[in-house]
Image (tube, rainbow, N blue to C red):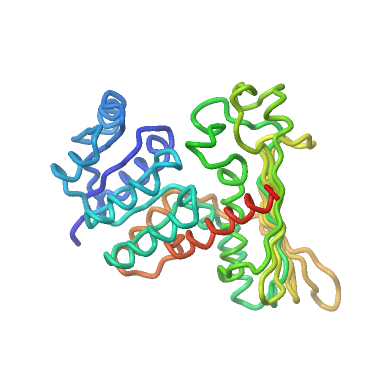
Amino acid sequence: MTRLKAAIIGGGNIADKNHIPALKHLSDQVDLVAVCSRDLAKARALADSHNIPHAFNETTELYQQCAPDMVVICTPNSLHHPQTMEALEQGCHVFCEKPPALHAKHAREMADLAQKKERVLAYNFQLRQAGEYALLMRCKSDGLLGDIYHIKASFVRRRGIPGWGYFTNKAMQGGGALIDLGVHVLDLALYALGYPSPDQVVGNTYDFIGKAGGKGLLGQWNPDTFEVEDAATAYLTFPNKASIMLSASFALNMEAEKERNLEVFGSKGGAKLFPFSLHTELAGELADVRFPFLEDIDIQLQNTKAFLDACTGKPSNVCTAKQGAILQEIVERIYQSAER
């Protein structure tokens, strides 16, 4: 099997700790040839630390000199759209970090171009690969849940406003807790429902703690330059009467330091994701079934494998370009609802 030539665009922590190790682990399928970052010294240092031969600070040079088959985009959110469009025009498959873009129209443009160029565009919603989520989907396919009609999706932190990077810069990120954290569990909820588009979206956003300042558990942020929401809530309804209740926060005056979960309610049974439990009836009695022996899974490695499967025409559960466009439209509608 011919290996795909891969390049990394972006020289930050997500490239260093997530994508590069996963691609190197899959060296039988991928030849990692280059790193590209606006800071050439940063690109060179990252490439050298992983024994990657080439480093660039211009994508034009990357495509001219290396002609990669695929690129992994792990740059600030505002760059996802232009860099993905360029990579697709160059004939590359694209594995892009979440969220897809800043605007729904950009996500749709990306999906349309991928279809036109017959290239794979996928997004790195790696929680799809968690063992607990795989078990949830098996319970669904086995009929243990019946018809899923409501999901509570939450990814919340008590005081977890990042004290580094661009996370509080609206121009670079497009938003705060919703577009950084909430999209992960929103993707899980939508995928469990078959990725429908909602007919109604009601949302609220808040910035009380972010703009006031206070104790931080992920570094200290500057309240004077805090431009995004520190918390968001939304309620989505779908044409078949299913619904999603979504909560996301960087900072919320709650008891726990952080919580990430999905609660699924079906006509025959329900489930909670982390840790996984199934809520049903057995032998005529109410029962909670737990699964204490689920294996730990490298979800980034598995999601990279899923992307490569899609590139080679194999069945894959990686987040597709079309699904990413639906999710981005929902995020946009939540923000629009919050502004009313």
Residue situated furthest left in the rendering:
65
Relative to the observer, which residue lies in front, 294 or 5?
5
Residue situated furthest front in the rendering:
340
Relative to the observer, which residue lies in front, 197 or 296?
197
Relative to the observer, which residue lies in front, 225 or 193?
225
Quarter of the image holding residue 189?
Answer: bottom right
Quarter of the image holding residue 21?
Answer: top left
Whether residue 226 can be seen here: yes
Q: Residue 269 in the image: x percent, y percent?
A: 74, 71
Question: Would residue 301 be found to the left or right of residue 280 on screen?
Answer: left
The quarter of the image holding the N terminus is: bottom left
Q: Residue at x 33, y 67 (%)?
A: 115
Relative to the observer, which residue lies in front, 219 or 279?
219
Question: Would residue 9 be found to the left or right of residue 250 on screen?
Answer: left
Q: Residue 323 in the image: x percent, y percent?
A: 49, 63
Q: Is residue 273 above or below residue 148?
A: above
Q: Residue 245 in the image: x percent, y percent?
A: 72, 58
Q: Residue at x 61, y 48 (%)?
A: 182
Q: Residue 250 in the image: x percent, y percent?
A: 65, 36
Whether residue 275 can be seen here: no
Question: Would residue 54 be found to the left or right of residue 281 on screen?
Answer: left
Question: Would residue 15 be found to the left or right of residue 237 on screen?
Answer: left
